Image: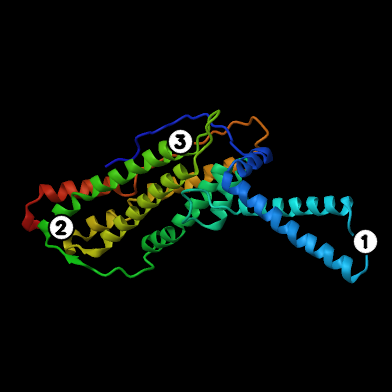
Amino acid sequence: MSSTDLASSETHMRFSYKNPFEHLASMLGQRKSLLALLGWAVAVFGVLMTGVGAASYFLNASLRGWAAFVIVIVLAVALALAKSVHSYVNRCPAGLENESAESQRIAQIQRPKWEFRLARRLLEERLRDLDVELEDLLGGRVFVPVERQLDPQDYIAWVQTRPANALRLVDVAKRLLVFDFPAALLSNEGRPADPVRIVDVVDLVQGLYSETVQFERASRTVEPPETLGALHDFQMGWTDPIREGVRQIFQFLDGVLAVDPKTNQEIHFTITFEESANIQKFNEELDRLISEEPWAW
């Protein structure tokens, strides 16, 4: 098994964002929002005019006339507009109904580099607990009950499938992290990044990370024959390249977020997948055991 095959991707990306005029056009361009704005303006106008009438009566003041009327209209429109802006800013973008309020706000306001900020936030929320679980597994800090005790022949048959499965996990990680993940953040002229697409690719990364945890857990649910304990120990931590690849993705996102969006600074970043630990020793030990007679185990 080897995970050192190189996978590279070069992409030219631009930062997308919405300026205040685009937000205003988006807010007022929807019939529902426009009707709500008019409704709030009428309601506020009625409340203010009632207050003006009450003040005129109880204070014996002259608050009538065109000047007072115009002031009330301006205040009603301003307050209604403020209400509309507040509702618009806190609106949940389609497809992000199940995400955190902070993620929804990032996708709704779309400040410069919002797509990278959203991807990082989603990754952090999705992977935080999984990464703690994986770290505890690798560090031997959690109890994993034995589910199977295999005889030598059955164990050799089982363990022979492990390298291929680990390699498939690493291959999927390469595809997701090197190609699919950056592509989901891509913005072109006239086509900004899509928040739903970012959510979808982050969900795929979460699924991969979950499979990584399950792979490491499966190694610990099998009790190897006493004579094959060394072979069993060699397969622990084979998913380290995946965890390291995800860590490098966070470094990439942090590097992008640290760049001034007003500059033309180019971002160069390389994700490296090193070969898993003890692969060579595992292969040598497995070849030695297979070459021996079964009763020698």
Q: Dot 1 surroundings within 10 Å: few (below 14), some, or many (20 or more)?
A: few
The answer for how far apart the CA atoms under marks 2 and 1 are is 96 Å
Mark 1 / mark 3, whichever is N-terminal = 1
Q: Position of residue 34 (x, y in %)?
A: 62, 46
- Please, what secondary structure does the residue beneath circle 3 have? helix
Per the image, the residue denoted by label 1 is 62
Work out whether residue 63 or residue 179 is closer to the camera in this orientation and state it: 63
- Residue at 12 percent across and 57 percent down: it is 154
Q: According to the image, label 2 marks what residue?
A: 155
Q: Which mark is residue 258?
A: none
> Quarter of the image holding residue 213?
bottom left
Disc 2, SS: helix
**Kind of residue at badge 1:** Ser
Residues at marks 1 and 3, CA–CA distance in whole angstroms: 65 Å
Q: Does the rendering let one see residue 297?
A: no
Measure the C-alpha gap from mark 2 to mark 3.
41 Å
Image disc number at residue 183: 3
Q: Earlier in the sequence, mark 2 or mark 1?
A: 1
Please, what is the three-letter code of the amino acid marked with disc 3?
Ala
